[in-house]
Image (spheres, rainbow, N blue to C red):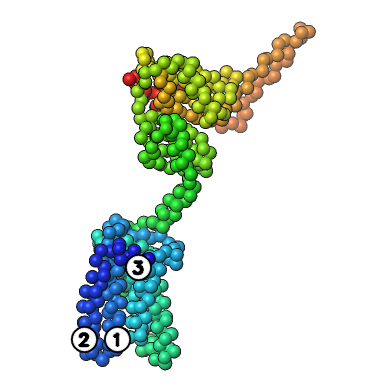
């Protein structure tokens, strides 16, 4: 299944592999005969190298922006199907190279650097391929597994490695020089993007808001009418809650998840409709909707119905406000309803009531026996206070318990008589 998907994602993969494998195998066969190298191992190595190049460097149809590379941690290297394919892709050529040259350290260094070179080429060219750190790790794991397996096989067969000390020295030199070149190339030409973290974040959002689309679509039909079709959804995080904003073919609606509380709605058609709905009936429509969706906002609130414009296409503005000891609370609930009974929009701000200011206690009157109260002596300023010091007066401004003024919201000011 994975191999079939990879073949389908890269057009012309098999013909390109066959052509490249034939060319490399023919050249390798000639060189092997001239140097008395094992012919079968050499041809197999050339074929695996052709497969490796065509799978990783042939232009594809999907990839990141040129100059970008996914630098996310390889947390899915053993669970991703593409990573497992990369591991399996590097095992055969690494193993065959070790069996052919019997220099495992040098072979491991070459294939690990070759993996980094492949990802660098993918990132700086418009091949339609994706450069990822996960691929580098997967390729390197495959190379090390192949080298390790071949080295064990050589040991079991009694075939000694060629000059182990020189092998390690060559490996160290190749690793240092190649790593320095790749680091300079990536730093100068490539920008790192943590795609893994982005994908995990998106997946977390999807899991946290699962079911919100269905809920808000049903509420949109309750506001705009049956048959309302959703065209898109936006999600914003606010503390432990998620604000869901749904766009439909008849307007927008938003609410909070997982609280399942609506916040506002605004119809696309802001014109009034001809009808015979009275102000009292408009108040009943708003009250019926509020009882279902905003029961807490109705407790202790006063309803006011005001007519917007005149004529048969006028609409009604229904507002709910609550007062405590003569102080307007910050809670607000507004509806705009046409004379046909259509809801143009609503706005809800379910804010907790502020604590009303305490009334000052009346000053005591003079004693009934006619005696005079002794006034406390004025407090003297301390002699130790520094020159130029002053006592700060409280800043003037509105009282913290003052609430909104009842100004209509956006969906109210956008209303136009038809």
Closer to the chain start, of discs 2 and 3, is 3
Whichever of callouts 1 and 2 sits on the residue coming sooner in the sequence is 2
Q: Position of residue 51 (x, y in %)?
A: 29, 73
Residue identified by numbered label 1: 40
Q: Is residue 390 visible?
A: no
* 361 or 346: nearer the viewer: 346
Q: Where is residue 232 in the image (x, y as percent from the top left)?
A: 38, 41
Residue at image position (58%, 22%) is: 300
Q: Can you identify the residue that label 3 sits on?
A: 3
Q: Which residue lies furthest to the right in this view?
A: 369
Q: On the rendered structure, is 84 left or right of 284?
A: left
| Label 3 neighbour load within 10 Å: few <14, some 14-19, many 20+ | few
Query: Which secondary structure lies at badge 3?
Result: helix
Q: In this view, does 22 lie to the left or right of 156?
A: left
Q: How crowded is mark 1: few (under 14 residues within 10 Å), some or many (20 or more)?
A: few
Label 3 to label 1, Cα distance in Å?
A: 26 Å
Q: Nearer the viewer, mark 2 or mark 3?
A: 3
Residue at 39 percent across and 39 percent down: it is: 230
User: Does residue 101 lie above or below 59 as drawn?
Assistant: below
Residue 332 x/y as whole percent: 50, 26
Q: Nearer the viewer, residue 217 or 77?
A: 217
The quadrant holding residue 193 is bottom left
Quadrant of the snapshot with the N terminus: bottom left
Q: Which residue is drawn at 50% across and 27% down?
A: 289
Is label 1 in a helix, a strand or a loop?
helix
Task: Name the outermost residue toward the front.
Answer: 227
Please, is residue 193 above or below residue 301 in the view?
A: below
Label disc, if present, on residue 30 of the rendered structure? 2
Look at the picture and state if 404 lies above or below 57: above
* Contact (Cβ within 8 Å) of mark 2 with mark 3: no
Give the CA separation, mark 1 to mark 2. Answer: 12 Å
Local crowd size for mark 2, using a 10 Å CA cut-off: few (<14), some (14–19), many (≥20) = few
């Amino acid at each position: 299944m994975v191999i079939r998907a990879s073949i389908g994602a890269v057009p012309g993969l098999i013909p390109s592999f066959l052509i490249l494998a034939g060319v490399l195998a023919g050249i390798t066969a000639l060189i092997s005969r001239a140097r008395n190298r094992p012919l079968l191992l050499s041809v197999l190595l050339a074929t695996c190298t052709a497969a490796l190049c065509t799978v990783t460097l042939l232009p594809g149809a999907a990839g990141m922006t040129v100059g970008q590379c996914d630098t996310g941690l390889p947390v899915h290297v053993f669970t991703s199907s593409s990573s497992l394919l990369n591991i399996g892709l590097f095992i055969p050529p690494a193993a065959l190279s070790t069996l052919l040259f019997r220099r495992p350290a040098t072979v491991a260094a070459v294939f690990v650097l070759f993996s980094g070179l492949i990802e660098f080429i993918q990132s700086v060219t418009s091949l339609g391929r994706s450069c990822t750190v996960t691929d580098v790790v997967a390729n390197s794991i495959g190379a090390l597994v192949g080298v390790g397996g071949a080295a064990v096989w050589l040991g079991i067969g009694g075939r000694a490695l060629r000059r182990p000390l020189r092998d390690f020295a060559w490996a160290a030199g190749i690793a240092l020089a190649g790593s320095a070149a790749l680091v300079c190339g990536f730093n100068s030409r490539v920008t790192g993007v943590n795609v893994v973290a982005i994908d995990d974040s998106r997946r977390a959002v999807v899991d946290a808001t699962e079911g919100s689309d269905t809920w808000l679509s049903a509420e949109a039909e309750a506001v705009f009418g049956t048959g309302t079709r959703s065209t898109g959804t936006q999600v914003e995080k606010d503390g432990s809650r998620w604000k869901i904003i749904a766009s439909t073919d008849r307007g927008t609606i938003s609410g909070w998840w997982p609280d399942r509380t609506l916040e506002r709605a605004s119809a696309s058609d802001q014109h009034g409709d001809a009808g015979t709905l009275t102000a009292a009936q408009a108040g009943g429509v708003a009250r019926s909707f509020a009882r279902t969706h905003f029961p807490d906002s109705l407790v202790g609130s006063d309803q006011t119905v005001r007519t917007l414009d005149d004529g048969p296409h006028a609409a009604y503005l229904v507002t709910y406000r609550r007062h405590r000891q003569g102080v307007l609370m910050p809670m607000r609930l507004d509806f705009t309803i046409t004379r046909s009974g259509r809801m143009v929009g609503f706005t809800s701000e379910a804010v907790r009531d502020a604590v009303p200011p305490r009334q000052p206690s009346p000053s005591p009157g003079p004693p009934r026996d006619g005696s005079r109260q002794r006034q406390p002596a004025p407090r003297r300023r301390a002699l130790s206070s520094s020159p130029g010091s002053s006592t700060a007066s409280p800043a003037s401004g509105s009282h913290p318990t003052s609430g909104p003024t009842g100004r209509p919201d956006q969906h109210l000011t956008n209303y136009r008589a038809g």
